[in-house]
Image (cartoon, rainbow, N blue to C red):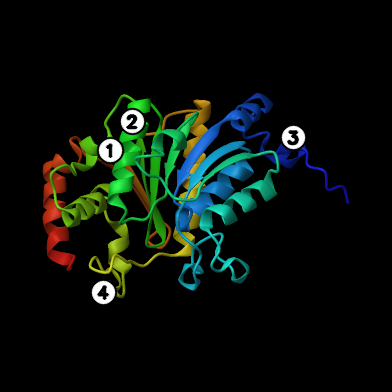
Amino acid sequence: MNKEFDYQRAFSRNIGWVTVEEQGRLRGARAAIAGLGGVGGSHLLTLARLGIGNFNIADFDHFEVHNFNRQAGAMMSTLGEPKAEVMARMARDINPEADVRVFGEGVTPENVDDFLKDVDIYVDSIDYFSVESRRLLFAESYRRGIPAVTAAPLGMGVGFLYFEPGKMSFEDYFQLEGHSRREQLLRFMAGLAPKAIHRHYLVVPEAVNFKEERGPSTGMSCDLCAGFTGTQVLKILLGRGKVRAVPWSLQFDAYAQKLAFTWRPGGNANPMQKLLLAIIRRHIKE
């Protein structure tokens, strides 16, 4: 068996859905992915198999047993290993020519310039509760004119948002400034999926625990996030058709077999969102 790597052969089955010229553009693109756990690890492998040739990846955490149900790099063979190093290794195993820049300390105000250097798109994958880091990354991406996407693993589906350069920003949509940390988390929840399709089949409500900063997640939702996001990344990088930017949001739920587009002008300042936030505050306990 010939074990020599050949980029054209490795990604030849993409041709047809993309042109040879477009595949070359993907090869030269650079994606930044912060967070390499549930959705982030799947994002990286999906985009690596798409043939994107350059990545800036960040995560300060290590793999643990409780990651096994959903995280692409979590296996017995990787227990205790740094997530960033494991996922970089897996991406390079798919494409040995890939330029993977690893930020094993995560993204901080001190290294965010380096993390977003030369980046064509930012893919948000950090933990739901890491509100400060998320605000920093979206603000810096917006300031640099970098397209940014986030896909939330909600139940057994995906909530997707696209922040297009020059249009509505993360802060304008979520309206987090001046609020407590708890209120910021609730506002992030409301903005991710205004229709909240997944709430109808949550059978153990106490599994959502804001005080302990934990919540349930499934491997199916992470894979759906990666598949949907990978498709939108392709469209954005290649200029292939419309991707609805905020204040549009999208939620697809495989369990409920439903797809919902929601338009919320003003983001969380919209009257419908204010009502939703009031409901969420009553139901989400400390």
Q: Position of residue 245 (x, y in %)?
A: 34, 34
User: Can the viewer see residue 245 in this picture?
Assistant: no
Between the C-alphas of marks 3 and 4, the distance is 50 Å
- CB of mark 1 within 8 Å of CB of mark 2? yes
- CB of mark 3 within 8 Å of CB of mark 4? no
Q: Which residue is mark 1?
A: 170
Mark 3 crowdedness (10 Å alpha carbons): few <14, some 14-19, many ≥20: some
- CB of mark 4 within 8 Å of CB of mark 1? no
Between the C-alphas of marks 4 and 2, the distance is 36 Å
Q: Which residue is mark 3?
A: 8
Q: Which residue is mark 2?
A: 142
- Residue at disc 2, secondary structure: helix
User: Can the viewer see residue 73 in this picture?
Assistant: yes
- Residue at disc 4, secondary structure: helix
Between the C-alphas of marks 1 and 2, the distance is 8 Å
Mark earlier in primary sequence (1, 3): 3
Mark 1 crowdedness (10 Å alpha carbons): few <14, some 14-19, many ≥20: many
Between the C-alphas of marks 4 and 1, the distance is 29 Å
Give the answer, above or below, for where 22 lies relative to 33.
above
- CB of mark 2 within 8 Å of CB of mark 3? no
Between the C-alphas of marks 1 and 3, the distance is 37 Å
Mark earlier in primary sequence (3, 4): 3
Q: Position of residue 178 (x, y in %)?
A: 13, 44
Mark 4 crowdedness (10 Å alpha carbons): few <14, some 14-19, many ≥20: few
Residue toward you, 254 or 284:
284
Q: Which residue is mark 4?
A: 206
Q: Position of residue 29 (x, y in %)?
A: 56, 31
Q: Residue furthest right?
A: 1
